[in-house]
C-alpha cells in the first residue's frame, strides 16, 4: 500500500541554523522558511533528487513538536512520510490492523495542502509515521 518516501522530517530548535547546515555544509537545495500557524510549525524543505527533508521548528504556544524538542534538545528525526493513493482506504486498513490513528482518527489537510494522517509510533517500530495522499 505505501508508495514513495515523500519526506523525512527533522525537528530543530533553530530553523535558520539548521537551514544553514543543510545549505552550506551539505550543499542542499533549501526553500524559504514558511510559517504554518495552523500546524504550529515553521518549515523549510530540502529538495533531494529522490525525496525531501522537512525541517520543523516550533511556532506558537501549542506546537505539536514542542515536547519532542524538550526531550531532544539539539533536534532529531521526528517522522517519516509515505505516499498513499487513497487516504480513506489507508485509514480503514490501519484501523482494521489495530494501528492507532492519531488526531481523532481522520485525515486533515497537512503542511503541503494535501490530506494527511499520523500513526502512533508504538505501532510502527518506534517511528511516527505520516501518510499523505498524493
Ligand atoms: Co511531514
Image (cartoon, rainbow, N blue to C red):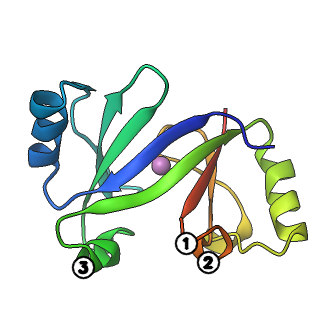
Q: CA distance from mark 1 to mark 2?
A: 5 Å
Residue shown at the point (68%, 56%) measured from the top left: 107
Instruction: Mark yes or no: residue 3 visible.
Output: yes
- Residue 31's x, y, as percent? 26, 28
Q: Residue at x 19, y 35 (%)?
A: 22
Q: Dot 3, crowdedness within 10 Å: few (<14), some or many (≥20)?
A: few
Foreground of the two, 68 or 22? 22
Closer to the eye: label 2 or 3 = 2
Q: Are marks 1 and 2 in contact (CB under 8 Å)?
A: yes
Left or right: 39 in relation to 71: right
Within 10 Å of the Cα at label 1, are there few (<14), some (14-19), or many (20+) other Cα atoms? few
24 lies above or below 103: above
Q: Earlier in the sequence, mark 3 or mark 1?
A: 3
Which labelled disc corresponds to residue 126?
1
Under circle 3, the secondary element is helix
On the image, the x and y values in percent for residue 41 come to: 31, 56
Q: Which residue is mark 3?
A: 70
Amino acid at each position: 500500500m505505501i508508495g514513495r518516501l515523500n519526506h523525512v522530517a527533522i525537528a530543530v530548535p533553530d530553523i535558520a541554523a539548521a537551514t544553514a547546515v543543510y545549505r552550506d555544509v551539505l550543499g542542499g537545495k533549501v526553500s524559504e522558511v514558511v510559517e504554518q500557524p495552523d500546524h504550529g510549525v515553521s518549515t523549510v524543505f530540502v529538495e533531494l533528487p529522490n525525496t525531501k527533508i522537512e525541517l520543523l521548528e516550533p511556532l506558537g504556544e501549542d506546537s505539536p513538536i514542542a515536547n519532542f524538542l524538550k526531550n531532544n534538545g539539539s533536534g532529531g528525526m521526528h517522522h517519516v512520510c509515505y505516499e498513499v493513493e487513497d487516504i480513506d482506504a489507508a485509514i480503514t486498513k490501519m484501523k482494521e490492523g489495530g494501528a492507532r490513528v492519531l488526531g481523532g482518527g481522520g485525515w486533515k489537510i497537512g503542511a503541503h495542502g494535501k490530506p494527511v494522517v499520523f500513526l502512533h509510533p508504538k505501532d510502527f517500530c518506534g517511528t511516527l509515521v505520516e501518510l499523505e495522499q498524493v
